[in-house]
Amino acid sequence: MGGARPKVTIEDDNHIWLTKLPEKNDRLNIQRIAYATLALARFVGLDVCGARLEKVGSRDALMLARFDRQGHPDAKAYARFGLVSGLTVLDAEDGYARDNCRMPNAVSLLRAARLARSTKPFLARGGFKRERCVGCRLVPSHCMCALRPLVPTRAGVCLLMADIEPLKPSNTGWLVADVVADTFAFGWARTETAPALVTLLSDPQWQAYVVFPGEYAAPGRVVHTALLPDPPGAAAARRPLFILLDGTWSEARKMFGRSPCLAQLPVLSLQPEQISAYKLRRSRRGDHFCTSEVAALCLALAGEHVAGQTLAAYLEVFTHHYLQARNQLPVAWEGVAHQRLREVCASLPQRAAAQGMAR
Ligand SMILES: [Zn+2]
């Protein structure tokens, strides 16, 4: 059988076993460690396959019952069941650094769902289709998956995305989803509201805000801070949830005006001075704020400064990789953007920073 380690298929008593063998250079008894790990997993209630250890000479062999085959005593054949491996679920490959294996983020999942609905392939601007990394949507030579930071933050972000927004390689919503663990993403449709969005908005742990210019909302709804007092009787402080309307300006206005589920929520209006202070720190891009910049500002407003700075630094790294790829230039791994991200990650608690410091 193929794979990184030696293994054989063994038939025994109408069962097929995948049998894992030691390798010459092993310094530990990997088979015993795997067996114990399965026992622990079973102990905590996970549904794991049958396993047994057998002696082969002086060494151990680990036999795993194949749950994707089922024997029948009368037939000389085995029924096959469909199966996807953990690597497939994580979009990873053998030999990937473990830090690169994460569940796909909310925006990736929305993109996958949107792609599944498309009848024709989506072509990014530029016309022809280039191979892109599934994690970061960049060409493989400019992949930045090893740089994903994970920041502890109380705040959450809910992205309402216009139809093709999750498919655009330049959309920065996925950067938010990478950095902020509690990021939710929904496709927006005028005629219906996703039930999961309604559930999210009624979850009492969150204080939701629609982030939108205040002049479009009734004055009573407009707030300028994300540090609102908790309603009377609330058991614990509520966590801020920022709803960002992700699309062109006209799409965003439509979402704002025609979403009944948003109509009662406070509208967080970013102040011109906050925007201009932010603009001083950024370079190259025009006046249009991208999704992750707005999210970084919101995090800062919620007092989550490290998270906001990390997201801003991560966006700079993305911008660098994106532009270098477009111009067919190499990545400057020691350049200003990467240095800044390393600095911000160095101020994070060690475990959370580990991924951002991978390079
Ligand atoms: Zn990548």
Image (spheres, grey):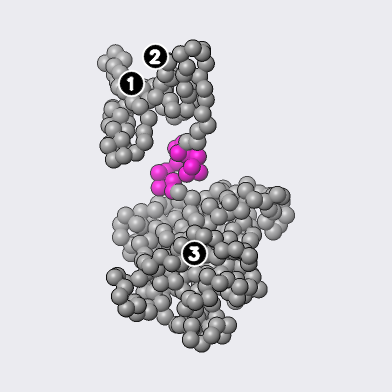
Is 228 placed above or below 161 here?
below
Work out whether residue 119 or residue 100 is closer to the camera in this orientation and state it: 119
Residue 13 badge: 2
Q: Is residue 311 visible?
A: no
Q: Furthest-bottom residue in view? A: 219
Contact? badges 3 and 2 (CB < 8 Å) = no
User: Residue shown at 50%/63% (left/top)?
Assistant: 197
Which residues fall within the magenta stretch?
86-102
Around disc 3, counting alpha carbons within 10 Å, would you say few (fewer than 14), some (14 to 19), or many (20 or more)?
Answer: few
Q: Amino acid under label 2?
A: Asp
CA–CA distance between discs 3 and 2?
Answer: 52 Å
Residue 61 badge: 1
In this view, the mark in front (3 or 1)? 3
In this view, the mark in front (1 or 2)? 2
Give residue 40's quadrant in the image.
Answer: top left
Around disc 2, counting alpha carbons within 10 Å, would you say few (fewer than 14), some (14 to 19), or many (20 or more)?
Answer: few
User: Residue shown at 58%/51% (left/top)?
Assistant: 113
User: Residue shown at 34%/77% (left/top)?
Assistant: 230
Is 305 placed above or below 220 here?
above
Query: Which is more N-terminal, label 2 or label 1?
Result: 2
